[in-house]
Image (spheres, rainbow, N blue to C red):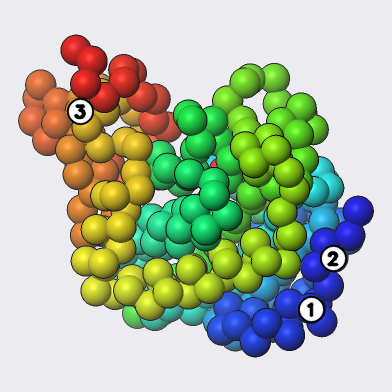
Amino acid sequence: MSGPSAEEIKGLCLPLARVVEVHDALASTQERARELALAGTPHGTLVLTGAQTGGRGRLGRHWGSPWGGLWMSLVLRLGLEVGLASRITQTAAVGVAEALWNFGVEARIKWPNDLLVGGRKICGILAESGVAPGGRLDYAILGIGTNANLDPSDLGVTDRGVTTIRSELGQDVDLLSLLRSILTNLDIALGHIKDFETVLDEWRTLNCTLGERVRVRRFGETVEGRAVDLTREGALLLSTPGGTVELFEGEIEHLAQRGTP
Ligand code: BTN
């Protein structure tokens, strides 16, 4: 199965496809993009592959990446302070969600990095950073895995919590058009990352976490509360019986539907 070629992608003339590498198969686009970042590749370097043999998700988890998905990593040089690194994930979630809506896929952001349709995961985002001396980010590797032209059963996961564009729309999408939409919306969202107010507004509109009662596991402890807001640093605020807790990381579980006691 063939996806977009490097020539087709370069022909889009997009700021986030300034340097393009396309592979048939790769262990992980994250690792390849990091090699390129360390070698000094510019902002807007894109690594795309047809399949991954060692795709990685958050917390070192395996990420099933068979043919038909859109598996990519971008090298970003945003000049952000280290303390604002969490904004990258939230900003990317907004950009990718908006791209999926353009295709009729009504994706919602589940904090911190999942895009869900009807409660099932359709896309995962993995932002990893390298720090420069002086406390700014040298680079960020933004990995985006979109379950596109495949069936949920192709993903090799046992739970029912995954979906794909094919199963949502009942048809496949043109991967070059999908890529163009993702890169375009991402570039627009990243253009607001320093100010962040626009991203926050869009995130609040697109998310499915705020208002929910959630359980979060982090650093070996469990916190329960109601998700009340996203901060300017990209942290989730939880209202708990012991007060407000600010979360930058964590494994989150929605406990009940909005509106239920
Ligand atoms: C998650 O939800 O845990 C994040 C998943 C990120 C998957 C993408 S696919 C492209 C890039 N390469 C990887 O190995 N991982 C990311």
Labels 3 & 1 near each other (Cβ < 8 A): no
Element at badge 2?
Answer: strand
User: Where in the figure is residue 240, as x and y percent of width and height?
Assistant: 14, 26
**Which label is found at residue 23?**
2
- Mark 2 crowd level (few <14, some 14–19, many ≥20, 10 Å Cα): some
Q: Mark 3 points at which residue?
A: 226
**18 left or right, relative to 195:** right
User: Where in the figure is residue 125, as x and y percent of width and height?
Assistant: 53, 51
Q: Name the residue under label 1.
A: 8
Of the residues shown, which amino acid type is indicated by label 1?
Glu
The residues tagged by marks 2 and 3 sit, at their Cα atoms, a distance apart of 43 Å
- Mark 3 crowd level (few <14, some 14–19, many ≥20, 10 Å Cα): many
Instruction: State whether label 2 is within 8 Å of ligand 1.
Output: no
| Rendered position, 194 above or below 223 | below
- Could you tell which of marks 2 and 3 lies nearer the N-terminus? 2
Question: Residue, x 64% and y 49% (percent of image)?
Answer: 146
Q: Which of 183 and 173 is in front in this view?
A: 173
- Could you tell which of marks 2 and 1 lies nearer the N-terminus? 1
Of the residues shown, which amino acid type is indicated by label 3?
Arg
